Image: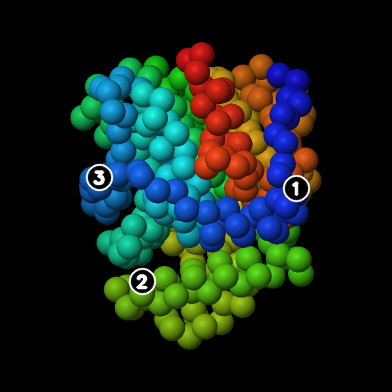
């Protein structure tokens, strides 16, 4: 599919990628969404918390929403999408990844960019307990990479899954890792690192035989975190092996349902490899939109609804 020309017209103040990213992540407020929590048990005995919101009328359509690194189901980019879809007759379930719903998960492992087995568990739960005949997926950042990997690594998808959208996606995880370690991204890098280390200290108390406080304190960078914890807890050799196996870029040629990727050109989290132009041109199911502005999961518009939200709804309307 040829690369799409974006129609996103950025409000002047939000043309700055830093402003767009920070405002959308820390200042934006989405009101009026009512969520109901459901806890499901995963095949390995751990749990996930799902936060549901519903259309005012009975719906046979559902969108599954997946958050980014250290996000949760209450982040504005999640609730903004859920609210818009609910207002247009589609139910929504916002997935909290392991350890992201306000309490530590049970197992030593948690979540990561390639943990598609947990997404599959959510989908199977929906199929086994609900009556939706149409399901859409939408992932943000880490959740976007996970969404694309899920779609491309499986030979057969449930027939109910009709289309997907992925926003601000680090398709090449090592490239994105290197971008996050640059000076311009230091505020983001340090915030992620601090949050992840604090959560790891809690996990260490629950699993003292698997990790020491001294080892956690030795973590100086996000790559260190992936070397010390992410890779070891999830069966990878090291951080580079984790990035290689989990990057969605290699799975894009195999995606078989209509899928939209929205990656802003001024997203400082993304390396050049995260703009899969060649893959989009060679796969009729893959639609790549690269707005000039938008930052990382930004895409601000006035009147409450963000561009990535209205664009996602417009994209899935035909399915």
Q: Residue 243, percent across and down?
A: 61, 52
Q: Residue 177, percent across and down?
A: 67, 58
**Res. 318 visible in picture:** yes
- Image quarter (top left, top right, bottom left or bottom right) of the N terminus: top right
User: Is there CB contact under 8 Å for labels 2 and 1?
Assistant: no
Q: How is the image coloured?
A: rainbow
- Residue identifier under label 2: 203
Cα distance between the residues tagged 3 and 2:
26 Å
Closest to the camera, between mark 2 and mark 1, is 1
Q: Which element is circle 2 on?
A: helix
Closest to the camera, between mark 1 and mark 3, is 1
- Residue identifier under label 1: 12
Task: Give the residue displayed 54% in from the left and 61% down from the top.
Answer: 26
Q: Is residue 127 above or below residue 119?
A: above
The 10 Å Cα crowd at callout 3, few under 14, some 14 to 19, many 20 or more, is few
Q: Which element is circle 3 on?
A: strand
Q: Quick check: 200 left or right of 183?
A: left
Q: Is residue 21 above or below residue 303?
A: below
Q: How many marks?
A: 3
Q: Residue 244, percent across and down?
A: 63, 49
Task: Give the residue displayed 55% in from the left and 40% down from the top.
Answer: 303
Q: Residue 72, percent across and down?
A: 42, 54
Q: Quick check: 43 left or right of 248?
A: left
Cα distance between the residues tagged 1 and 3:
37 Å
Task: Give the residue displayed 25% in from the left and 45% down from the top.
Answer: 36
- Residue identifier under label 3: 36
**Res. 169 visible in picture:** no
Q: Earlier in the sequence, mark 1 or mark 3?
A: 1
Camera-nearest residue between 119 and 244: 119
């Amino acid at each position: 599919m040829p690369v799409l020309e974006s129609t996103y017209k950025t409000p002047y103040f939000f043309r700055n990628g830093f402003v767009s990213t920070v405002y959308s992540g820390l200042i934006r407020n989405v009101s009026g969404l009512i969520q109901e929590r459901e806890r499901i048990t995963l095949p390995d005995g751990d749990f996930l918390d799902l936060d549901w919101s519903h259309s005012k009328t009975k719906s046979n359509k559902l969108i599954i929403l997946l958050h980014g690194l250290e996000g949760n189901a209450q982040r504005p980019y999640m609730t903004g999408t859920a609210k818009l879809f609910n207002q247009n007759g589609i139910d929504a379930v916002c997935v909290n990844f392991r350890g992201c719903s306000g309490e530590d998960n049970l197992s030593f492992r948690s979540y990561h960019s390639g943990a598609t087995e947990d997404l599959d568990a959510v989908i199977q739960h929906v199929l086994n307990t609900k009556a939706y005949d149409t399901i859409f997926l939408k992932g943000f950042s880490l959740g976007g990479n996970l969404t694309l990997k899920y779609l491309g690594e499986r030979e057969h998808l449930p027939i109910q899954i009709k289309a997907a959208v992925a926003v601000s996606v680090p398709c090449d995880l090592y490239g994105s890792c290197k971008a996050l370690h640059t000076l311009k991204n230091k505020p983001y890098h340090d915030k992620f690192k601090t949050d992840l280390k604090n959560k790891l200290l809690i996990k260490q108390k629950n699993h003292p035989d698997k990790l020491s406080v001294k080892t956690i304190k030795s973590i100086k960078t996000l790559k260190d975190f992936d070397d010390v914890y992410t890779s070891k807890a999830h069966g990878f050799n090291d951080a580079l092996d984790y990035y290689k196996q989990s990057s969605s870029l290699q799975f894009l040629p195999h995606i078989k349902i209509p899928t939209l990727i929205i990656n802003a050109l001024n997203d400082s989290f993304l390396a050049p490899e995260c703009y899969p132009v060649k893959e989009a041109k060679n796969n009729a199911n893959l639609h790549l939109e690269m707005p000039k502005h938008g930052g990382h999961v930004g895409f601000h518009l006035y009147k409450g609804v963000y561009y990535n939200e209205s664009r996602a709804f417009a994209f899935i309307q035909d399915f």
